[in-house]
Amino acid sequence: MQGLIMDVPLTITSIMQHADCNHGDQEIVSITTDNPRHRYTYAEAFRRTRKLANALSEYGIKPSDRIGTLAWNDYRHFELYFGVAGIGAITHTINPRLFPEQIIYIINHAEDRLIFVDPFILPTLEAIADQLIPVEAFIVLTDDENLPSSTLKNIMSYEHFIGTCKDEYSWPDLDERSASSLCYTSGTTGNPKGVLYSHRANVLHSYASNTPDVFNFSTGDAAMPVVPMFHVNAWGIPYASPMVGVKLVFPGPKMGDGASLQALIEEEKVTFSAGVPTVWLALLNYLNESGKSVDSLKRVIIGGAACPEMVMRQFLDNYGVHVHHAWGMTETSPLGTVNTLKAHMEDLPDTELYRMKLKQGRALYGIEMKIVDDDNIELARDGKSSGLLKVRGPWVCSDYFKMEGKNDVHDQDGWFATGDVATIDSDGYMQITDRSKDVIKSGGEWISSMDLENAAVGHPDVVEAAVIGISHPKWSERPLLVIVRNPNSDLQAEEIIDWLKDKVAKWWLPDAVEFVDEIPHTATGKILKLELRKQFSDFTFDI
Ligand code: AMP
């Protein structure tokens, strides 16, 4: 027997309509390239979103078309999140920090018809425009007055694009399982892979995010996402906030700037924020040096890389800010776990307390989590056994965009292998202990060890090269290049770094080079990275 309950689709449009109706006067404040402090309300944001929807439809954008964005966190990007998905098209957020080759690959692979771009990022596109095959026009996120001169053809300002369009729009009824947004991850080997989110997944993820042990949002909150809107929908904050009526504060291009973040927090009374450890370290350093405070800030979610204990302690002891550690992936929308202590843990002795707080946290309702050994046998949740972390749930990716069936994205029981190695304790707290995937995460961005190795072995004096991530106080991880050199050569570290300079991005260059006689291998000849990481577990960079 079926329940007698209305079958109302869970769509992003419904979040927008709810906020418009119930939280219309709540504020959205942004720093943009053309305005140091833009402010308006949800009602105005969604009025302009309807103009955007008309502009897109009049242009000829159809359901399922992909629309690229290369933009910082601000109100126009927010309008794109809702306007594009609302007409049934797909918001494809692109990381402007990727190499030009990766941006070209991603835009062509996604077949983006339009690109909405921040004026700051325009030069990146100008350099590659002739290789962006599907792109019909570029729309710059500013007004006509501030539109930079450009070598790009088919370019106009955002304000011009939506300018004369009506602010009435009849949103279509969408299938909740239809795609709403797309984000490529380079946290795997090979080409970046597209994770295609659905309306339903985003709505369920927002519901879960708003629960007390996760974001704990209420109308009294002001949330400042310092995680970029081009990275997994800014951890879902632009969807979770209007669902509850939270004030949104967007730092625009000022995300890594401690002074601007502090000013924004104080002046806009920000209560909540989220981002990767490197950003929080920058803010912490600024606060320590300037003697300034962040009195309104109550909670910060730190994830994307392991949160250093010092950051957690100093934020609480010096500034009264509770830091919660979280874990997630592009493939998990992204929230998988958040660390909020259970009541019986609050009085633990200091060392024990921080041992618990530093774990990546408990699964949100909706996410199932387990660890398995090499034979896919589930391991004990005893806080000691460590194995490959697998997850499944209604906001975990089931396949990659246009690669359906080509990767073993999940096993036959539907579990997604994260590539992270972890323990889970009897209270359900997961802790990452290692990574089985062969990539390095530096300041929240991925570096491909494979690409670095391939470039290094191109040197005539290199017999074999391996790259591993070594923990780094500022960037979380930095690459160490391990080399077996030709027996007759006395190749030096500087020479190989020089060799790599025109082959990889500057920020990918290894921070150190070590020469060894031999690199450990599996029986089939693959480099044993886990073994190599053990070998260099005491290695530290000269900083
Ligand atoms: P991305 O898809 O770029 O968001 O990266 C996801 C990956 O970042 C995860 O699979 C982990 O390897 C890593 N990661 C995310 N959060 C954490 C965390 N709190 N601690 C350690 N690693 C993390």
Image (cartoon, rainbow, N blue to C red):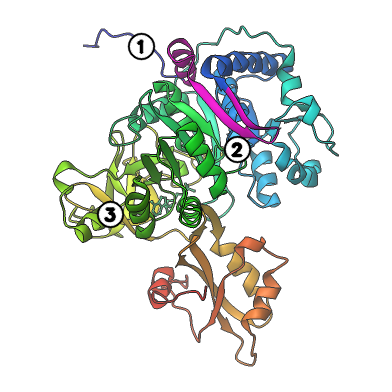
Callout 2, which amino acid? Answer: Gly
Note whether residue 488 is visible.
yes
Q: Secondary structure at mark 3?
A: strand
Q: Secondary structure at mark 1?
A: loop
Q: Is residue 49 left or right of residue 373?
A: right
Report the number of numbered marks: 3
Residue under circle 3? 372
Q: Which label's residue is closer to the chain start, 1 or 3?
A: 1
Q: Is residue 423 above or below residue 495?
A: above
Looking at the rendering, the stretch of residues picked out in magenta corresponds to 12-39
Q: Which residue is found at the position 52% from the left and 26% from the top?
A: 180
Q: Is residue 160 above or below residue 225?
A: above
Ligand 1 within 8 angstroms of badge 1 C-beta: no
Callout 3, which amino acid? Answer: Val
> How far apart are the two marked residues, 3 and 2, measured between alpha carbons?
41 Å
Q: Which label's residue is closer to the chain start, 1 or 2?
A: 1
Note whether residue 193 is visible.
no
> How far apart are the two marked residues, 1 and 2, measured between alpha carbons?
38 Å
Disc 3 residue crowd, few under 14, some 14–19, many 20+, Cα 10 Å: many
User: Residue 506 at x, y = what percent?
Assistant: 66, 63
Q: Which residue is found at the position 52% from the left and 18% from the top?
A: 42
Residue 23 drawn in magenta: yes
User: Residue 28 at x, y = what percent?
Assistant: 53, 25
Disc 2 residue crowd, few under 14, some 14–19, many 20+, Cα 10 Å: many
User: Residue 450 at x, y = what percent?
Assistant: 56, 63
Callout 1, which amino acid? Answer: Asp
Q: Which label's residue is closer to the chain start, 3 or 2?
A: 2
Residue under circle 2? 252
> How far apart are the two marked residues, 1 and 3, measured between alpha carbons?
37 Å
Residue under circle 1? 7
Disc 1 residue crowd, few under 14, some 14–19, many 20+, Cα 10 Å: few
